[in-house]
Amino acid sequence: MIKQFVFNHFQVNTFVLYDKTGQCVIIDAGCNEQTEKQELFSFIESNNLSVKKLLLTHAHLDHFCGMADLARKYNIPITMHENGKKIFHIFTLQAQGMNFQPVDMTDVAFEYINYGKEISFGDNYTLKTLNASGHCPGSIAYYSPSDNAVFVGDAVFRQTIGRTDLFGGDLDELVDNINNNIMTLPLDTVILCGHGPQTDVEYERSNNPYIQQY
């Protein structure tokens, strides 16, 4: 099951994935205000969920501003690709540039994963990690075969792709990764983006100018 929230002034899509066992993972905890954090906490508690992973698609602050509080509350690390450290470690500058309050990362642990690794939780719930870099270094897409969905962060949006003019961006790398790793998924795969509405592989193959013809 997938629960979606929209948080902070950048309107980031935060996702909670869970099953009948009550185990869950959270993708891109963008809850910034205390009311947003409480909304997420309340959902977890009211559904008796046990948080097993905090998964980050990429290291831009609007997507991880709520991660530190969750990591401390549930005593688990933030999971990301090691290349994301290049961006993550300038979170103070990101806060200034994005008009966020400073984030306290004290006593927060990290788990670094490589592309291709599978993340399992609950009753055979599996996510496959795909290289989605190009918007920024270390970007990961999480593909859930059981949900027929892929969580792409800011790699792909409906009829367009993520910006590459920020630090570490690379247009050619992003286009290659989208075409090779996301557009090769089954046509009916739902694409759950980091901002805005969802789309799917078939639609983007036909309507996204950055997607090659198959």
Image: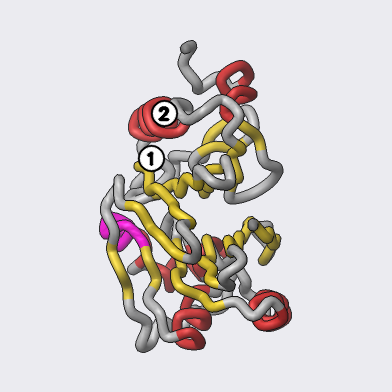
Q: Quadrant of residue 33?
A: bottom right
Q: Residues within 10 Å of mark 2 (few under 14, many from 20)?
A: many
Q: Position of residue 125 (x, y in %)?
A: 48, 57
- Asked if residue 69 shows in the view, the reply is yes
Q: State whether residue 75 is above or below residue 177.
A: below
Q: Position of residue 115 (x, y in %)?
A: 30, 47
For the residues bearing labels 2 and 1, Cβ distance under 8 angstroms = yes
Residue drawn at the location 52% of the way across and 49% of the way down: 153
Q: Is residue 137 left or right of residue 10?
A: left
Q: Which residue is mark 2?
A: 175
Callout 2: SS: helix
Q: Which mark is residue 134?
A: 1
Residue extent of the magenta highlight: 80-86
Q: Disc 1 on helix, strand or loop?
A: loop
The residue under label 2 is which amino acid type? Answer: Val
- Identify residue type, mark 1: Gly
Determine the CA span between mark 2 and mark 1.
Answer: 8 Å
Residue occupying image coordinates x 72% and y 81%: 46
Residue 172 percent coordinates (x, y)? 35, 28
Q: Quadrant of the N terminus?
A: bottom right
Q: Is residue 182 above or below residue 213?
A: below
Direction top: furthest residue: 213
With 9 as the anchor, is 29 left or right in this view?
Answer: left
Q: Which disc is residue 163 wearing?
A: none
The foreground one among 53 and 137 is 53
- Our reading of the magenta stretch's main secondary structure is helix
